[in-house]
Image (spheres, rainbow, N blue to C red):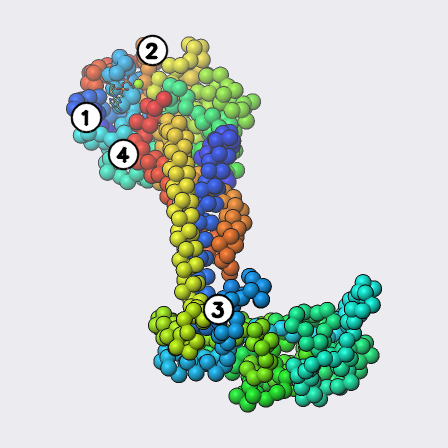
Amino acid sequence: MIRLTNINKEYDLGETKVSALKDVSLEIGRGDYAAIMGPSGSGKSTLMHILGILDTISSGQYYLEDYDITSLPDREQARIRNQHFGFIFQSFNLFPELSALENVMLPMSYAGVPWTRRKDRARDLLAEVGLEHRMTHLPTMMSGGEQQRVAIARALSNDPDLILADEPTGNLPSDKGEEIMQILEGFNRKGVTVVMVTHNPAQGERADRVIRLKDGVLLPEQEVVRA
Amino acid sequence: MHSETAKILSRRFTDRFMESGLLIIAVALGIGAASSGIALLANTISSGRKTLESPTYREIVVSSVGEADDMTEPVSLRPVQENAVLTSADLDAAGLVPAVNYAYVQNYSRMSFINEESISREQAMRAQFAAQAPPEGDFGAPPAGDASESAPALEASGGDPGAAPEGAPGGSPGGEEPPGRPEQYSEEDLAAMAAESSILISELEEARGYKVTPEFFSASGVDVAAGSFFSQQDMTGSSSIAVLGHELALSFLEEGDEPDSLIGKQILTREGLVTIIGVLESGEQDEVFFEPYRSSGGGDFRRSVMNTQLRFSVSDPEKLDETALQLQEWFTRQFGEQQIVISNPRAEAQQLISRNTGLALLIMFLSLSGLFIASVNVSNILMSRSMRMKKHVGILMALGASRSRIAKLFALESLVITMAGALAGMIISLPLGNYMQSSLGIDGGTWAFTLLGVLLSALLTLSFGLLPARQFSRIDPALAMRAA
Ligand SMILES: Nc1ncnc2c1ncn2[C@@H]1O[C@H](COP(=O)(O)OP(=O)(O)O)[C@@H](O)[C@H]1O
Ligand SMILES: [Mg+2]
């Protein structure tokens, strides 16, 4: 689905340059369940942003289904993020002004889904992550685990092909983190591609593949062979 | 609005009610002040232009000294009363001054009407005097001296002479004002007069007007709606005739009657019957009447009270100064130094207009500075508001908002604030603008300029308010998401 070749990402800090990714080549296949691991500052988030077309690359190529998307206009990139990708963040990043339902409805409004239909779908999604009793609540009234489940529902609202999750359990106690892992794995089994950053080796081992980064360099990947 | 994104903004807006309210107040004050400033300047300039277009400001006014400051001192104290007396003969000066196209006399005049009210008022006054005055003070004195002022008019107009004579003019120099001087009519006389279809009884107490020579009508550019102006013969005749301004004429007409029907009719006044020979089109001279100026007769009394004003009109206002000088020369030769005042109303009006324009310009400058400062602050506050939203902007982009959508969102926010401010500002500026105009003595100001001012200043505010939108349409989503 996604092919990155010889990606370099440099941050220009005036006199010095920080090289966050060095010559990274990577393929993500449809239905993959990949974990990205590595020490802090190794470039995991940078890689996620590049995968999600949220950041520009300094050199290299990004192909999405054989299309070079780096040259697409902003409006097209936004459309791809909206309809093909779903983002989940460590700090949930729900909009505090909106109810759980409205948070889930928001990406659908960009896709032009009519109000009643996006409301219905948001209800279904929230029920699917076990929050049917929390629809009208504001994020501030919810626990971290609940908020992250709303975020997952939001990421899934436009039926994405790829979920990009940057340390989704990083701010959660382990039992709540486990809930999140199971929800994500459930969607992966239904065919959604999942790329997840994690610090937790146990979580990493549950993925089909582990992508390791160190100082912006991709380490050779070990295929996880399941029994 | 069904967009969740707009809900985010509107809820942020209402959650921070104080801040949002202050923003709108700042915008309202800025726009209110600036638009009244702009309207004031525009109105000052346009009303100044309009004023100068009037025929009055294409004239040189010549009058004898002492009249210039008309009624500020008692008649008896005027210093040079006897020396210079202008008459219509002095209009000959025009022949020697090439730029003058019309020359005429225009003197103030007044017509007091006789009607039931005036009669009963007079009777009441008479009764009061009878009660107060000692027996010797004989107010009902028999006619003394000449009655020349009013009697001929009455006879000429064919009015009922029997109605007039009782206690005719006492010749008292106190002159124009009552009590008890002129012809007295009884209620029966009035009824008899009213019965005659050719005689009109006014419902008004009095009317103001002018004694003029025929060129007045040419100079002022008015036209008659019915009848005609005075002819040169009318100037020497002795019949009492008048041309009425449009509104004044209407006061004599029944609903639906044409002004034509007034021609030839006579109005009952204290000075006798006055025949209407013309009615003006509606225009600047609506509520006044005109009677022919006749310089003959009157003697010393008339001369001292009836100060004659001569007016010399030119077609090209540029020539006014030069004309004033030439007239000055002519009148100085005739009457000597310091006897005659030559005034140039246009120059005076221009002075006033330029002073007002200067003031208005200053006010506009200050109010625009206020608006500028307010706008910069509003822009700053909006910017810091949006900065706090920076991370959320990054998330919106991750969820599929394009840059232009983000820009529109922030633009909408400033637009709402600006519109609310402009509306409130308009409520401030309409009365404020009116007040400033009336305090500068400018009339004929229009709302249109205030609206224009609101529009212009709202655009200024908006252009500042759009800065955050511009900024955020360029934001780097990855960077924004890393923001705290
Ligand atoms: N906007 C930025 N400007 C400069 N340096 C940055 C920026 N974003 C990330 N970096 C640097 O790039 C490197 C990779 O960061 P990041 O991708 O966030 O690492 P990780 O997610 O693995 O902790 C780090 O050295 C970080 O300091
Ligand atoms: Mg990171």
Question: To which residue does mark 1 refer?
Answer: A14
Q: Secondary structure at mark 2?
A: loop
- Kindly identify the residue that appears in the image at 68 percent across and 79 percent down: B271
Whether label 4 touches label 3, CB < 8 Å:
no
Mark 1 vs mark 4: give the one in front.
1
Question: What amino acid type should be assigned to the residue bearing mark 1?
Answer: Gly
Above or below residue B259? Residue B131 is above
* Figure quadrant of residue A24: top left
- Kindly identify the residue that appears in the image at 48 percent across and 83 percent down: B89
Q: Looking at this view, is B288 or B66 the one in front? A: B66
Please, which chain is the residue tagged with disc 4 on?
A: A
In three-dimensional space, the C-alpha distance between marks 1 and 3, rounded to whole angstroms, equals 84 Å
Above or below residue A38? Residue A67 is below
Mark 1 vs mark 2: give the one in front.
1
Question: What amino acid type should be assigned to the residue bearing mark 4?
Answer: Glu
Please, which chain is the residue tagged with disc 2 on?
A: A
Question: What amino acid type should be assigned to the residue bearing mark 3?
Answer: Val
* Figure quadrant of residue B468: top left
* Figure quadrant of residue A190: top left
Question: To which residue does mark 3 refer?
Answer: B65
| Left or right: B277, with A196 as reference point | right
In three-dimensional space, the C-alpha distance between marks 4 and 2, rounded to whole angstroms, equals 31 Å
Question: To which residue does mark 2 refer?
Answer: A200
Q: Count neighbours of disc 3 (C-alpha within 10 A) and say few if under 14, some if 14 to 19, many if 20 or more.
A: many
The reply to the same-chain question for discs 2 and 3 is no
Please provide percent x and percent y for residue B365: 38, 47
| Left or right: B398, with B273 as reference point | left
Q: Quadrant of ligand 1?
A: top left
Q: Count neighbours of disc 2 (C-alpha within 10 A) and say few if under 14, some if 14 to 19, many if 20 or more.
A: few
Question: To which residue does mark 4 refer?
Answer: A65
Q: Secondary structure at mark 3?
A: loop
